[in-house]
Amino acid sequence: MRAFFIWMSRSELFRRLITGFLFVRRAARRFVAGETIDDAIAAIRTLNASGTLASVDHLGENVESEADARRATEDYLAVLDRIGIECVKSHGSIKLTQLGLDIGVDFCQENVARILRRAKEIGTFIRIDMESSEYTSRTLDVYRSLRREYENLGIVIQSYLYRSKDDVAALCQEGANVRLCKGAYKEPPDKAFPHKRDVDARYVALARMLLSDDARAQGAYTAIATHDPKMIDAAKTYIAEHCIPRDRFEFQMLYGIRRDLQQQLVREGFTVRVYVPYGAEWYPYFMRRLGERPANVWFVLRNLLRE
Ligand code: FDA
């Protein structure tokens, strides 16, 4: 089912068909803060009031023209300005294919540098999301090249990729700020573990590497991004056993998912950051979320029955 929804997320025909339905647009609002900057800021404000931090994502990926990539860059500058003006607690999450990676690495890097400069001015942090494996090396190259100049930059690693163990080892030595997730794209078995149990086992192993004394001594910071209670418990156990200070890691979850668990972690005194997607291009993001959990499809269909 996951593969089917990932395939749907790439289909222009289905995008046009599905986004036309009011009940789908209504259901998407559970996972997407809305279409405008005002919607995003309102969602961040609500999260902040409940003790959680945010990382805002202006939805969009795989742009094909320089004009579209520049427009996406301007949109990010605008949302950063609002974060600064409204004093809400939020980082930014960006996708390189939205900022022109398919057009050219240098061009993309210039756009990201503009975003980083503005983020630095308002005292916030930018994280580069990880997309499908065809982009992993280029994404890490852009990250490393910009990280030399900008300290307010972090990266994402996906535990389902075989290569991630080596990538994490290198990032630990570099003292990187890494968000660890399982991975949301369809990958072939020569690149990624096909079975969930292996993805989960690797997730725990990579989290331990990132949280280790050695990695922390180099300055590493870990964002444990998952809704899986088993992953969270494994991280908490390692953290307690190694007396890891709470300012060296945080938990992250997606907007609208496991709000109960988000609040439980806040009550336990952990830092929790919620990824807040907004924008008109919500279709591929929404399809990936549907593929992750069959119950989400019933949630959409219930919205149809309510119409
Ligand atoms: P898993 O899929 O095993 O789910 C465990 C449990 O969590 C489920 O049983 C269910 O209760 C709940 N759950 C999970 N997904 C749900 C959903 N969609 N709806 C409702 N409940 C759900 N991926 C990527 O490739 N690149 C990236 O940059 C990022 N960035 C990112 C940021 C943040 C903050 C998070 C939390 C996740 C990502 N991801 C990502 C997505 C990630 O790779 C993964 O696809 C999802 O987090 C789902 O995996 P879980 O770790 O939650 O576990």
Image: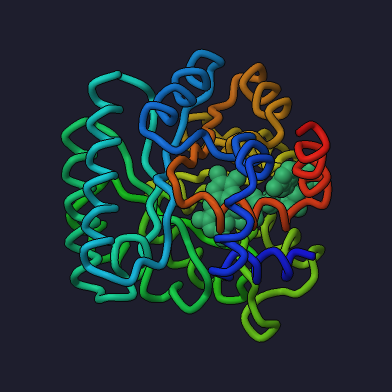
Q: Is residue 75 visible?
A: yes
In the picture shown, does residue 129 fall above or below 274? below
Q: Residue at x 38, y 52 (%)?
A: 94
Judging depth in this view, the residue of 186 and 273 nearest the camera is 186
Q: Quadrant of the N terminus?
A: bottom right
Q: Residue 118 appears at what percent x and percent y?
A: 18, 40
Specify the quadrant of the image occupied by residue 78.
top left
> Which picture quadrant has residue 77?
top left
- 229 to the left or right of 81: right
Q: State the image quarter where residue 68 is shown.
A: bottom left
Q: If the image is split into quadrants, where does the C terminus sit?
A: top right
Residue occupying image coordinates x 62% and y 61%: 184
Query: How many dots with numbers?
Result: 0
* Front one among 207 and 159: 159
Is 96 placed left or right of 21 in the picture?
Answer: left
**Is any part of residue 231 visible from this angle?**
no
Vertical arrangement, residue 3 with respect to residue 287, above or below:
below
Q: Position of residue 233 (x, y in %)?
A: 75, 39
The color scheme shown is: rainbow
| Whether residue 51 is situated above or below residue 55 in the rendered picture | above
Q: Residue at the location (60% across, 19% down)? A: 269
Q: Nearer the viewer, residue 217 or 52?
A: 52
Residue drawn at point x = 37 percent, y = 41 percent: 92
Residue 5 located left or right of residue 78: right
Q: Residue furthest bottom?
A: 190
Quick one: which residue is furthest to the top in this view? 49
